[in-house]
Image: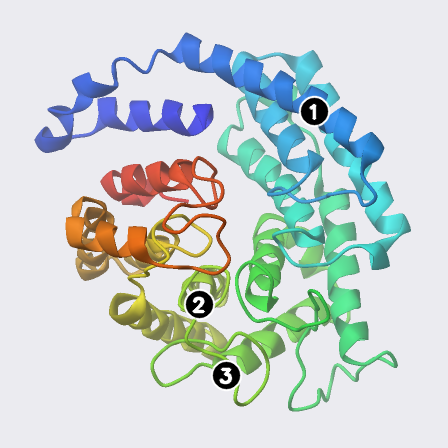
Amino acid sequence: MYIWLLNFKKNLHTSNSSDIKEKTESVEELNEKELLSRAEQSFQTLHDLLKSEEKKAKKLRISFYFGGPGLYLNGCLLSFLKKDKTAFKQNLQDLLSYKSIILNSPDKFYKEILYGVSGYLHCLLKLQSLFQDHPDASDFHTDLSEHVTELVELIVNDGIRSYDPDGVDLKELPHDFRLVYDFHEREYLGGAHGLFGVLYTLLRAYQLNNDYFAKEKDGKFLITVKASLELLIKYQRKNGNFPTRFVEKGHDDAVQFCHGSPGAIHCLLLASKIFKGEDIGTKCLNAAVLAGENIWEYGILKKGFGLCHGISGNGYGLLELYKETDDKNWLYRAYCFALLKKDKHYTDEIAAYDFSDRFTTGISDYPFSLMLGLSGDICYYADCLFPENAR
């Protein structure tokens, strides 16, 4: 959160908008040294807790969202900001220590992004992106391409093997072929637990390590990823949404990041950018636009705000469409979603909604968290001010 607030403050100071500049004074209280100090305290507290918990845990948590890798990634980012090369090296070493555990026992871990191997890969990709964004910081640069491509190979091979243990003919794939990943013995499509989330991570790896994939002789990566995208698009409903699972009569009224159109948009738009000029690229862009219309029509949720299954997570799909299409209609719609926070009628609906998965009616189980709480909401509201920098 400190890194995000730091960038937010810089954006306010460099903005050319008079409306935004009038509000700059309100963030002067975001003292950078104090925020950095709090971030360090939080990191150390969580680090001590993690060491204690991992000793007792029956199963190792390996993803960005749940587990040590997310903490060590933030440790790397924190030490990078402090220009502390020693701490950076230690955090990176701790982060990479999980890779051998994954490679030695791949069947123990899911491959989806929220809890699984794709979530771990996300951490390495974030660091690769950091190195590319700061080419002048050569003292911190570390070549992670081998680590990344090993994990990509693992994920792709597992997806092929889960579809057919005997393998497939890459020159003549079955009509229903897709990379297959299960979560609690179910095959999902969504951004958190399903194929869209895995494919997004794989495509990001492809984008950041293009030289490696260009040397791939059998074309396995592109063939299987494109085939998976083709099948996903075939499952898109007329209203723009996607079913939760790969079944003809699948449940398709979930419009949220973890299941449904909001979690599909990011993958589809990234694919449309990577495969621009190809038929699959055009299909992905059209599917993303249709998914956006579905969010606009059905994306106001009684579950409330938050990123995982809430209004803020849905709004990010609209912001992403604005970034890729430059159509201000999508930005206007994203603003409308953000302004619902001030709508008493809507907030009263949330407070009264009896959502069975919650401990207390109308209140998130983790009200200050990134995925289910206020932290994610704050990121969304500020990204509405600077949508070109939204991530």
Q: Residue at 64%, 24% (x, y): give it.
A: 46
Q: Residue at 45%, 81% (x, y): give it.
A: 236
Tell me the kind of residue under disc 1. Answer: Leu
Say left or right for 50 vs 258.
right
In the picture of the structure, the residue carrying the numbered disc 2 is 276
Sooner in the amino-acid sequence: mark 3 or mark 1: 1
Q: Nearer the viewer, mark 3 or mark 2?
A: 3
Q: Is residue 247 above or below residue 361?
A: below
> Which is nearer the eye, 190 or 59?
59
In the picture of the structure, the residue carrying the numbered disc 3 is 235
Tell me the kind of residue under disc 3. Answer: Tyr
Specify whether residue 334 is in view. Answer: no
> Which is nearer the eye, 140 or 82?
82
Count every numbered label the image shows and give the total: 3
Q: Is residue 51 above or below residue 210?
A: above
Tell me the kind of residue under disc 2. Answer: Lys
Q: Residue at 66%, 78% (x, y): give it.
A: 178
Residue 131: x percent and y percent?
Answer: 57, 32
Sooner in the amino-acid sequence: mark 3 or mark 2: 3
Residue 49: x percent and y percent?
Answer: 70, 24
In the picture of the structure, the residue carrying the numbered disc 1 is 49
Residue 191: x percent and y percent?
Answer: 52, 61
- Residue 175: image tag: none
Specify whether residue 249 is in view. Answer: yes
Q: How is the image coloured?
A: rainbow
Q: Residues within 10 Å of mark 1 (few under 14, many from 20)?
A: few
> Which is nearer the eye, 23 or 249?
249
Q: Secondary structure at mark 1?
A: helix
Say left or right for 246 vs 3.
right
The image quarter containing residue 108 is bottom right
